[in-house]
Amino acid sequence: MAKIFCVANQKGGVGKTTTTVNLAAGLATVGQRVLMIDLDPQGNATMGSGVDKRKMPLSVYDVLLESASIREAAVLSEKCGYHVLGANRELAGAEVELVALDHREKRLKTALSEVADDYDFVLIDCPPSLSLLTLNGLCSAHGVVVPMQCEYFALEGLTDLVNTIKQVHANLNRQLQIIGLLRVMFDPRITLQQQVSDQLKAHFGDKVFDTVIPRNVRLAEAPSYGLPGVVFDPAAKGSQAFVEFAREMVERVRRG
């Protein structure tokens, strides 16, 4: 039975897509069967997984409107070793179309129930705003992985996200919880980052993942080659950190 995790943070530019594609690649590297779902109309996670969003015959848009199943719409990224349910500009229109439809926030959940045994992990890259698309992700997930930069404003964004998760948990998805906070783009030489990191650990305890993703040029370069850093340069510090994070994630799921 697949574990379904959203990668979400209401603050933009914190590395959600980088986290999603590299965790997907890391999990595939350690032998897991992975489906990566791109719920952002920009389609960055799709392109960053070696799939051309302009050439996809079917996308997550078709799945949400129930004109295709996930098995029909997902494609295998051979370079990356995981399946991709991609997104493109069409998805922006789905927001408007979904409003008038029944069970509009549960459509992804329904679609995923058909493929729950095909994968070990399903990772969902959510847009930064709280929209119907994000809601579909949160309603179908067992938990949320929150990538965070250790900066002052990041803590404010986290408060908003925790409140959103509480609301979704209370009204739409009783399973939903924060799985963990992942410290990304971390530079231990910056005192403030160390202080915020300590604050996070003091407040959230074991909800903070042990693995820390360092600030890394190779991770930043990888999307321009249409690949996750883990595949683009496996020897880079950031790539190795994501593989380590994948192992930690598998271990957490096993422990329950």
Image (cartoon, grey):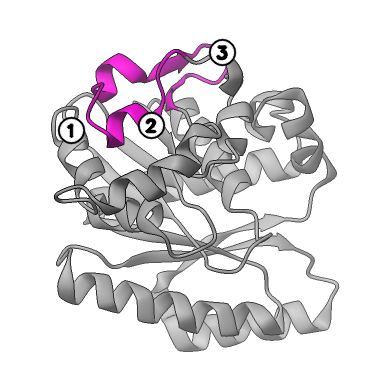
Q: Dots 3 and 1: beta carbons under 8 Å?
A: no
Give the residues in magenta. Answer: 57-85
Q: Which mark is residue 54?
A: none
* Residue bearing mark 2: 60
Query: Which tag, 3 or 1, sits closer to the chain's start?
Result: 3
Q: Say what secondary structure mark 3 lies in.
A: helix
Q: Is residue 39 left or right of residue 63?
A: right
Q: Residue at x 65, y 25 (%)?
A: 231
Q: Distance of mark 2 from mark 1, alpha carbons?
A: 16 Å
Q: For the residue marked with disc 2, what is the amino acid?
A: Val
Q: For the residue marked with disc 1, what is the amino acid?
A: Ala
* Residue bearing mark 1: 116
Residue 74, percent from left and from top = 37, 20
**Quadrant of the rendered structure where residue 153 is?**
bottom right
Query: Which tag, 2 or 3, sits closer to the chain's start?
Result: 3
For the residue pair 234 and 217, the one nearer the viewer reads as: 217
Q: Nearer the viewer's eye, disc 3 or disc 1? A: 3
Residue 5, percent from left and from top = 35, 50
* Residue bearing mark 3: 55
Residue 106, percent from left and from top = 19, 50
Q: Residues within 10 Å of mark 1 (few under 14, many from 20)?
A: some
Q: Say what secondary structure mark 2 lies in.
A: helix
- Is residue 84 shown in magenta? yes
Residue 141, percent from left and from top = 27, 52
Query: Which tag, 2 or 1, sits closer to the chain's start?
Result: 2
Q: Residue at x 59, y 82 (%)?
A: 155
